[in-house]
Amino acid sequence: MAGSSTAYVVGTFDTKAEELLYVAGLLRAAGLSVVTVDVGTKIPAAEADVSAEAVAACHPDGREAVFAAGDRGAAVTAMTAALLGFVATRQDIGGMIGLGGSGGTSIIAPALRALPIGVPKLMVSTLAAGDVGPFVGVHDIAMMYPVTDIAGLNRLSRVILANAAHALAGMMTHPVPQSADSRPALGFSMFGVTTPCIQQLTARLSGDYECQVFHANGPGGRALEAIAGSGMLQGIVDITDL
C-alpha cells in the first residue's frame, strides 16, 4: 500500500451520498485518484465506484449476511466484517477517509485500524467529540467532529468537510522524508515517576539504538504491545508496569 496515491472515500451512500461525493470531488481536484465505497446496509442507487453489494460480497458468508440480517444492528456488524474483507483485497489504498454517524463510524473505524501504521486515515464522525478510544484503539487515526450532523451540505458542513478532504490530500501528497537510520529499534515504557530513568537510558543507548518511548497511561502501553507484536521492535525495556 505504501506509495499509492489512491484515496478511498467510505460511507453510507443511502444517507450521505451528497457529502461523500463532495469530499471525493475535492480530493480529485487536489490531483488524487479516488475510489468511493458504499457501506450502506440498504441497496441504494449505484453512485459509488464500489457498491454496497460488492462490499457485502466480501463477507465470509456472502452478501446475504448483510442484506438479510434482519435488523440494523446485525446488518451493521455484518457490513463491518465485509468492509474488513474488502480492504484486505485492495493493494492501492494510499489513504482513507470515512464519514459517519454512530453506525457508519462503527463500520468504518475497524477498516481504518486494519490499515498499516503511517497510511493516512481520517474519520469525520458525529461521535468524535466524545470518547473515541473504542474507534481509534492504538492506531494513527485522525478524528474530526463535523459540528453539524452529516445530513446535507450547508455553509458550515462544506467548510468542515473541505478541511477534512484537504487534510487527507495533504497527508497523501506530502511524503514523509525518508531516514537512512539503520539502528535497531527499542521500545521503552515511561510514566512520570520513571521519566528520569528512561531519559538516562535513552541518552546512553541512542548512539546504537533508535529509542521509541511509550507513555504507560493505558493506550500507550497497548500501543507498545501492538508495535512489539507487529515485529517493528528489536527489544523492549519495560521499566514502567504496563
Image: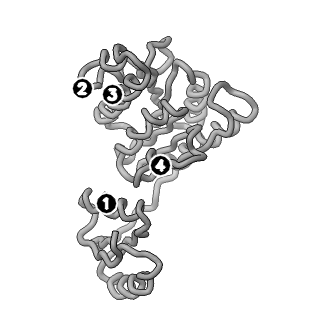
The correct choice, above or below, for 4 with respect to 205 in the image is above
Q: Earlier in the sequence, mark 2 or mark 1?
A: 2
Mark 3–mark 2 Cα distance, whole angstroms, equals 7 Å
Query: Pointer 1: what residue?
Result: 227
Mark 1–mark 4 Cα distance, whole angstroms, equals 15 Å
Measured as percent of width and height from the top left, residue 51 is found at 42, 19
Q: Is residue 50 left or right of residue 97?
A: left
Q: Are marks 1 and 4 in contact (CB under 8 Å)?
A: no
Mark 3–mark 1 Cα distance, whole angstroms, equals 26 Å
**Amino acid at dot 4:** Ile
Measured as percent of width and height from the top left, residue 63 is found at 31, 17
**Amino acid at dot 2:** Pro
Query: Pointer 2: what residue?
Result: 60
- For this rendering, which residue is in front, 177 or 113? 113
Q: Secondary structure at mark 4?
A: loop
Q: Which mark is residue 162?
A: none
Q: Earlier in the sequence, mark 3 or mark 4?
A: 3
Q: Earlier in the sequence, mark 3 or mark 2?
A: 2
